[in-house]
Image: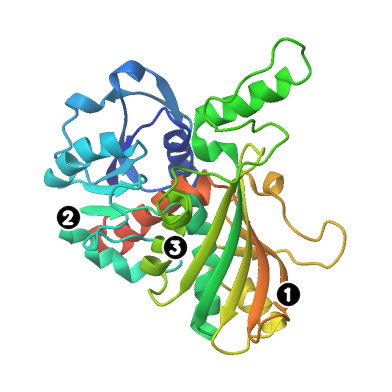
Amino acid sequence: MGYKVVVVGATGNVGREMLNILAEREFPVDEIAALASRKSLGTEVSFGDKTLTTKDLDTFDFAGWDMALFAVGSDATKTYAPKAAAAGCVVIDNSSLYRYDPEIPLIVPEVNPDAIEMYSNKNIIANPNCSTAQMVVALKPLHDRAKIKRVVVSTYQSVSGAGKEGIDELWDQTKGMYVPGQEVAPSKFTKQIAFNVIPHIDVFMDSGDTKEEWKMIAETKKIVDSSIKVTATCVRVPVFVGHSESINIEFEEFLDEDEAREILRTAPGILVVDKRENGGYVTPVECVGDFATFISRIRQDVTIENGLNLWCVSDNLRKGAALNAVQIAELLGRRVLKKG
């Protein structure tokens, strides 16, 4: 016996990826519905070897459905997620709307699976920010061994994190560089993204941090340990898919780089590719379409007493969004609903 599953926002990048991953991982689905806004109503989307026609989110009745994977913005989520939850359909939400609600679990299954029990508070589960998700997968097994005091992270985030408009802008600007008179001015981003990097993701806050940087701080504390100090600099780079992170970690006790490498090799969701030779590391291009979070460049930081550096790469449309949501659905099925 399988589940009745709804994918909300099925025509967007993340929604389509959710459908792909549900099919790839053979999630036990008895019935599936693809929902979209009225402007996308009737659009066809793929689910394995099936073609689904999108239904109207505004009029959909969530009663009798087991779970709904939401891949729409916070405004739409604020309207429709409570309706689904009230109808008895468990919401797994990819927006930022519920991440900081203390009554709603924020889950990365490899890191804090026990938090799934909190779902019943509001029948809603939050999916973390893309840049946070891959980082905490790397931090948790190291934190369990030698408690982390402080993390300094710089991100190199692909344009797909800004949606289809971000992908289109990079593509159009890149083409326009080579065709006189067809240059494309910034629209989605604050400055030219082609052949450039932009140290600005989301809005600026009074502290000087951007909202993206604040998210990484707040979410790491909620998912891993509230005592960890985190500082982040988030940068948009001209890469289509795949987020990268340079992570510096300070521990309460010494952790040798060789032991850290072995801990990460055996940790769930991680693949270590760490050879000290040309090409002995993973780049964003190589991670696209993969389920894993890749760790490379593991080395001691000799400038502090108990420090390590590492390089972390993952497909942001997968582990950073759709894959993590599906993994939450799998966890919910195993631990709570127990149908599949």
Q: Which of pointers 2 and 1 indicates the residue nearer the eye?
A: 1
Residue 217 — which label? Answer: 3
Q: CA distance from mark 2 to mark 1?
A: 43 Å
- Residue furthest bottom as drawn: 253
- In this rendering, would 154 be left or right of 107? right
Q: Residue 273, percent across and down?
A: 73, 63
Residue 122 — which label? Answer: 2
Q: Residue at x 70, y 47 (%)?
A: 286
- Residue furthest top as drawn: 181
Which quadrant is home to the C terminus?
bottom left
- In this rendering, would 297 be left or right of 206? right
249 w.r.t. 69: above or below? below
Q: Residue at x 61, y 21 (%)?
A: 185
Whether pointer 3 and pointer 2 mark residues with C-beta atoms closer than 8 Å, the reply is no
Q: Decide which of 311, 25 is in the foreground and name it.
A: 311
263 w.r.t. 317: above or below? below
- Residue furthest right as drawn: 278
Q: Which of pointers 3 and 2 indicates the residue nearer the eye?
A: 3
Classify 10 Å Cα crowding around label 1: few (below 14), some (14-19), many (20 and above).
some
Q: CA distance from mark 1 to mark 3?
A: 23 Å
Question: Counting residues from the N terminus, which is met first, the one under dot 3 or under dot 2?
Answer: 2
Label 2 amino acid?
Answer: Lys
Occupied quadrant, residue 75: top left
Question: Counting residues from the N terminus, which is met first, the one under dot 2 or under dot 1?
Answer: 2
Label 3 amino acid?
Answer: Ile
Residue 299 — which label? Answer: 1
Q: Can residue 245 be seen in this snapshot?
A: yes
Classify 10 Å Cα crowding around label 2: few (below 14), some (14-19), many (20 and above).
some
